[in-house]
Amino acid sequence: MNQCMKQTERAILLSVSVALLLMIVKFSAGVVTHSMAIIASALDSTLDMMMSVLNFFAFKAASKPPDAEHAYGHGKVESLAALFQSMFIGASGAFVIVEAVKRLISGSYVSAIPLGIGVMAFSCMVTWLLSRKLRVLSRSNRSLILGTEQVHYAMDFVSYLGVMAALVLAGWTGQAHWDLLVSILVAGYIFKEAAAIFGRAVSELLDRGLSSTDLRQVKLRILGHHPAIVGVHNLRSRRVGNQVFLDFHIEIRGEDDFKKAHNMTESLIEKIKELHPNADVTVHFDPEGE
């Protein structure tokens, strides 16, 4: 577990470093080329860096063990960090759209297009390499934070291709509106990301449970664990960060030995953790009919 935590920390710090590099390179290129699409992409890298920094500190805080005042751990630190991130990201997307519309009305131009294309090609290469590394680590560590980071950078890769296409079209046609239209599309992508993060954060803060499909899988695993388990009720769940909390009652038939019933529930908990490795499971067993 400690090794996984160290790998996660190093991967998040790598994401911060890459995002900082891309932010500096793209803002510089945006100033030189006057490309709103590159500036919007630089702003997206700024947000990437801020999100990775927040994820790092949130991961450190959320990884603290439960204490007397936080019996269920500190996982909601991640949810609070994500909530603030989503609001800031949404405001940044609004800025990009307002600025792009102003330039569409007042007129705009793009210069040094080959430089802009080269910068975006460099960004694509760096982002692709980072996304691959994050995907490998997220799968090996089963890390939700790294999985989220990987998906985000993979989508950034696609948006960079769109910016390159806009610069090519602007250079080919001599019309800067291609650049502005793509900047609006990038801003739309930023809004989409913000909405997804906001929705997830609110769900976790409101203790939203597992989906009906996930709960059905848990129930089937409970009932299929041992022939003596003939019923399950009061099944409840909630998710905080990458941790799932589950509690339920099971009905046991023909078992009067407390130790055997206890061992049955312990093995059941391990079986449920095959579905949700980070689950915190509480089981109460009742005699059949009670």
Image (spheres, grey):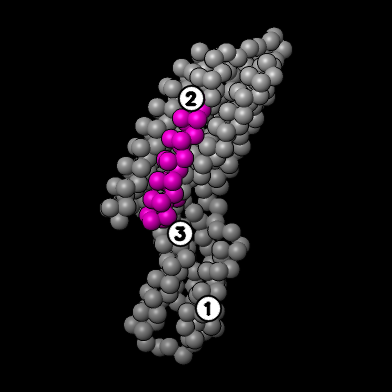
Task: Locate residue 159, reporting x and y percent.
Answer: 57, 34
Q: Quadrant of residue 161?
A: top right
- Direction from residue 130 to residue 91 in the image, left or right: right
Q: Residue furthest left?
A: 2
Q: Secondary structure at mark 2?
A: helix
Magenta residues?
118-145
**Per the image, is 84 magenta?**
no
Residue linked to disc 3: 245
SS state under label 1: helix
Q: For the residues carrying marks 2 and 3, which lies nearer the camera in this image?
A: 2
Numbered circle sitting on residue 223: 1
> Given the image, on which type of amino acid does mark 3 rest?
Phe
Q: Is residue 1 left or right of residue 40?
A: left
Quadrant placement of the N terminus: bottom left
User: For the residues marked 2 and 1, what is the alpha-carbon distance in whole angstroms?
Assistant: 57 Å
Please, which residue is most extreme toward the right here?
A: 105
Dot 2, crowdedness within 10 Å: few (<14), some or many (≥20)?
many
Disc 3 element: strand
- What is the number of the mark on residue 119? 2
Q: Residue at x 32, y 42 (%)?
A: 10
In reply to whether residue 143 is colored magenta, the answer given is yes
**Residue located 42% across and 22% down the image:** 24
* Residue 93 sits above or below residue 232 on the image: above
Residue 186 % position (x, y): 60, 30
Residue 290: percent from left, percent from top: 52, 81
